[in-house]
Amino acid sequence: TRMSDATSLGALIDAQGLKIRDLKTAKAAPDAIKAEVSELLALKLKYKELTGSDYVAAGAVAAPAPAPKKKEPTPVVAVSKEKAVKKEEKATKVEVVAAAVESVDLNELVVYTGPSGFSNDALKVALVAQLYKKDLKVKETAPASVAKRTPFYPAMVVPSSQSSSGHTCKHGTVLFGAAAVCRYLADSAVSSLESSYLDMDELVLSKHLKVGSGSDSSAIASVLDRLESDAKLNEMPLALHVLFPNLRSALSAVKTPLPYLRAAVKTVETSPLLAAASAAAVAGGEAKGKAAKKDKKAAAGSAAPAGPAVVFTNDDVVRPVLGAIDWASAGLMSSLKIVFDAALIAAFPQVPEARAGSVISRCGNAAFGDFQCNNAMGLSKALKGLEGYQGPVSPKDVAERIIKAIPENPIVSATSSVPNGFINITLSTATLTNSIAGIVQNGVKPPVLPPQKVLVDFSSPNIAKEMHVGHLRSTIIGDSVCRLLEFCGFDVQRVNHVGDWGTQFGMLITYLQEAYPDILTNPVNISDLTVIYKASKKRFDEDETFKLTSRNNVVKLQAGDPACTAIWQLLCQISRAEFQKVYDALDISLTEVGESFYNPLIPDTIRELDDLKLVETDESGMLLLRLPHFTIPLIVRKSDGGYGYDSTDMAALKYRTQTLQRQWLGYITDAGQAPHFHMCFDAARAAGWVPEHHRVDHIGFGVVCGDDGKRFKTRSSETVRLIDLLDAAKDRMKESLRVRAEEGKSALQGEELENAARIIGYGAVKYFDLKQNPVSNYVFSYDRMLDTKGDTAVYLLFAYARLASILRKAKDERNVDMAPLHLQAQSLLSVAHPAERALAFELLQLGDVIKSVLADLLPNRLCDYLKTLAVAFTDFVTKCHVLNADNAEVMHSRLLLCEATRRVMAQCFQLLGIGTLERI
């Protein structure tokens, strides 16, 4: 029972470690990481109380098998070509004798430096040994029994039963590589795992923080700058001593001051630990002369024959143990990454490429499997370049070693490798059925992602103008992105950055005061405003007196003049009412924060940029912000002292990142504004407002075109009003449904038909836009978007209604009560038929699809998934009778598949902002 409890605790520790790693990779909030570290420390303490020893992280190599008592034929030593020929000619059996195993004193703590002698890696080990008061001996030549199992130096043989790197290491276990040996020395010395240990592990193993002679000077300088700014090394003595040799070399190669790092290195240089470590090295190095020659001669005598000395058997692979993981929430591909990340490190623990993470993709041909792991080819190339490595190097052999290291898990039922190294992966039936049961019983769950504070800036129409077809894309793309983020638990602010400030309001106020003196008591409508805007613009361009008055009115408005402010507020009120009609039709919620909000913030923003020496005044008096890679500058203040879009957008960036503390900003505008926003983002990073690990994204979208390939306009070449476009789609769908009802294909009448026309019509417009890659242009076509076949919302909504009909008939015609079936879903579900399995497999892809959408902010991927799922469902109901199944057991299983499909499709529609219908 004690061993069982320890194993369970170990599994929990492994799972917690993986969770912390994922949080760090995702740049989660420090408090969230700290909380998980505390949980890990508590688990470690329980383990020590139970077993009397510490539990540590993964990476040991299994102990070699005991040496045979007598010489016996063995296949582990290759036969030279000459002997093979001789054997063939004489047809006699040549006895191949295994190399004698030199005994290792397991009472000593010895590190073997290998042929390269006392390298930086060996110095790291010696320093850590001194840090933890370990009596360590340093030797150059390892016994043959150790050398043949050591692809990397330094190496060490565990002298006593200890736990290292997540596995119990028996007497004689070989650890190789400085990282593994240093971990063992630290873990076997400290009484409990400190949080600084985790920081050290992350720091030393991070591929972004490697400092070595092989790096170019700019890379070294970048790493040193980061370490200098972190200023944490003195708080992490283990990290400092492990990094010391490389830091010392790197600092000697750069001229920058780096006072913190140089002081930290000086601390080690002047400490007695370095002197003691060096003395141990000298003691090991002085064991030369006759004794050394004798050792070398003995090692040479016991070595394997020339040629490829070892046939690799993968017997040394230690399969890691995974803890309790919520596989359903993780998503299939993410779950497989957990499994294969662990397998890669276990198979090649000291190869940096193995720590870069597994590359998992769906199989192109379902006949070979569900997914494939694509790491073996890259690892094969990396291994061929490693000096002294004698393990497998062909992609096929590397793949087989990875397969050998796959930890026990509930999701993989079979694997196979092919000559080019791809590992085909087949999911277990239990994974499919249990996950589908979870959807039926608990609903569709979002993928687990680190929570963040996000702000999405979208829609952004202009006051005093009607929303037109050009606003369609920003509005519905932004809404879908927000829905996805909210579903995943992010704190999302939806911001409508309306154009409610600027020169245009001066000319509007001037025109209205002249032409509509009673405007405040007899207001106009939005259509009148559109006409007024055009007329005022014409006067502004042609009449200098009107232009001067308009500019004066802008100054008055900015100063808070009551008359100008009253007209401005009326214009905003009229426009908002019209905007809301569109938002209500599209079921979109937004919080208006217009350009005027940021106007008072601009002076302080400019002062800060000036203090940071990021701006300069040109000969015309304009204040410019120009970074080295800019082809044109940002104009943060005009020569007349006024402000433009650059000023407003920089003030908005500062407010959103500094005041609102948003960690992720998304701007959704037409693609033509991309250069402007990327310049603003770069400037904000240069000002220090946007930390490196925070996201600032711009989603640029293309143009909605007519049949002529030009911007979509009315026959009179006017811009199409968005509300008219939506109503036209609704009216066309209403007529189509009326015809279907007359033909007996639909029972919809009256208000129900009107509601269906609205849902399908508006949904068709949304889906037709969202399914496009945002950056692409597309041709607007009512006929194509309202087609009942193909990739349209109409086809998808009809498929959903068919699903609902099957479930409704099960109750009405077959007397099936679904509630008890839901409770028994795990035992009732079966995916024996290929179409059943294909549908179940697609249902479980949603979590990974959502992650992919959010990674690149491309909602069209969700549309692709919904279409694929609908096709899989159609294939399923075509090939598998549901209500007319062979028996009740099969019918119940297939009804549960239908219910899971209904739930997943409904969730997809919700994320796209499209309503659903139970009957059409």
Image (spheres, rainbow, N blue to C red):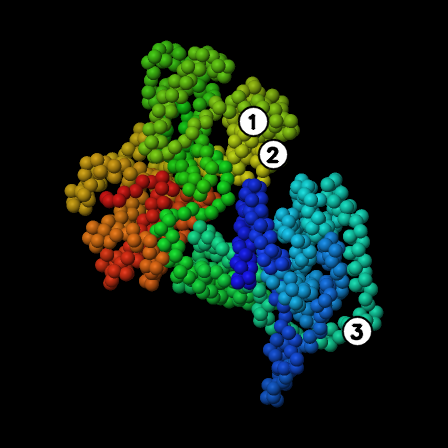
Instruction: Say above or below: 47 vs 146.
Output: above
List x then y, in percent, for residue 218.
67, 45
| Residue placed under numbered mark 1 in the picture | 635
Using the image as rendered, state which of residue 413 and residue 574 is in the foreground. Answer: 413
Q: Residue drawn 38% across and 14% down?
A: 512
Q: Residue drawn 28% across and 61% down?
A: 889
Q: Secondary structure at mark 3?
A: helix
Q: Secondary structure at mark 2?
A: loop
Asked if one can make out residue 11 in the rendered structure from this viewpoint, the answer is: yes
Mark 3 near mark 2, Cβ–Cβ under 8 Å? no
Marks 1 and 2, the one that precedes in the sequence: 1
| Residue placed under numbered mark 2 in the picture | 688
List x then y, in percent, for residue 745.
19, 46
Name which residue type carries label 2: Gly
List x then y, in percent, for residue 711.
37, 34
| Residue placed under numbered mark 3 in the picture | 294
Name which residue type carries label 3: Lys
On the rendered structure, is 739 left or right of 583?
left
On the rendered structure, is 745 left or right of 621?
left
List x then y, in percent, for residue 96.
64, 81
Q: Quadrant of residue 107?
A: bottom right
Q: Residues within 10 Å of mark 1 (few under 14, many from 20)?
A: many
How far is mark 1 from mark 3, CA to CA? 78 Å
Name which residue type carries label 1: Ile
